[in-house]
Image: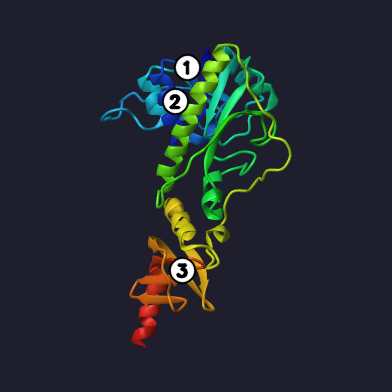
Amino acid sequence: MRLLFFGLPAGVSAVVLRGLLDDGRDVAGVVVPAAAVPHLLPNLAPPVAHLSPPAIPTLSLGEPTDLLALTWSRGLPVLAVADFDHPDALAALRAFAPDVAVVACFTRRIPPAALAVPRLGFLNLHPSLLPLYRGPQPLFRQLRDGSPTGTTVHFMDEGLDTGDIAAQTTVPLPDGLSGPEAERTLALAGLGLLRGVLDELGAGVVSRQPQGSGGSTQPAPTDADFALSTGWTARRAFNFMRGTADWGRPYAIEVNGRTEWLAAAEEWHDAQLDRPSVRHGRHIVIRFAAGVLYAVLAASQSSTMAAKTLD
């Protein structure tokens, strides 16, 4: 089967594409959103453009880790699409003659006309146990809620992550895993599922299960979503902070009538504390509903506290 791959220049898209290429799958080309590559497009960006590799290749030690470098290193064409409903964009997609499209991390909704191009449809890797946690940044939401993590391969329809499920698995994450590491872990699990689904499609077997009613959809996170609660377990707070540290946001938490601002989580212990919190310089220990969290205070807050101490 001929595959058409949809992804983003950065993130886990390259992990999935590399797995498909290493399997010897027939990948016809790669599609990225035009908004993700403005530096590679003319000032008046067309609805669709074929991207060329740079005239002077960048030095790469080993296998490229970003999607465009990987794609060009394997000699595949890259298409940047600004308007998926435009006739020129649809014609460019049809020119690949794909049997199926594979999506791994994509920031654009794909309209019905484009969804109809591959004869077997679109398959999307979504890092949650659908129908739970539809929408953007599902990993953030699962870590914040302390929920079971997993990955799903589903057929795409006009809705947002609402298409029939082709395969799904729970993927427990180790404590303290960073966001990029967690995303990679879920992507690799999704790749394993995707391989099975593609093999079935190649054999003429189509397994799909409607998601049914229920589920949940969350918007993109805001600053307020980084707030913690002492009603959580310390383990939940620790894993949420570690898994979202790459966002670079402070974490607010109300402790004994005072708002503390945390910069990073150091560790957690299944222990007890005889008071809400204990400070030592830039470090703080906080009592949660279960366990205690060892964290680093945000620099601005620790500087303010030091100034008050001097006064």
- Type of residue at label 3? Trp
**Which residue is painted at 41% across and 20% down in the image?**
21
- Which of marks 3 and 1 precedes in the sequence? 1
**What is the number of callouts on the image?**
3
Q: Where is residue 34 in the image (x, y as percent from the top left)?
A: 53, 31
**Which residue is painted at 54% across and 46% down in the image?**
148
- 5 with respect to 160 (left or right): left
Location of the C terminus (image quadrant): bottom left
- Type of residue at label 1? Val
The circle on residue 267 is: none
- Which of marks 2 and 3 precedes in the sequence? 2
Q: Which of 88 and 299 is in front in this view?
A: 299
Which residue is the site of mark 3?
Answer: 261
- Which of marks 1 and 2 precedes in the sequence? 2
Measured Cα–Cα span from mark 1 to mark 3:
47 Å
- 134 with respect to 258 (left or right): right
Which residue is the site of mark 2?
Answer: 17
Q: In which quarter of the image is residue 292?
A: bottom left
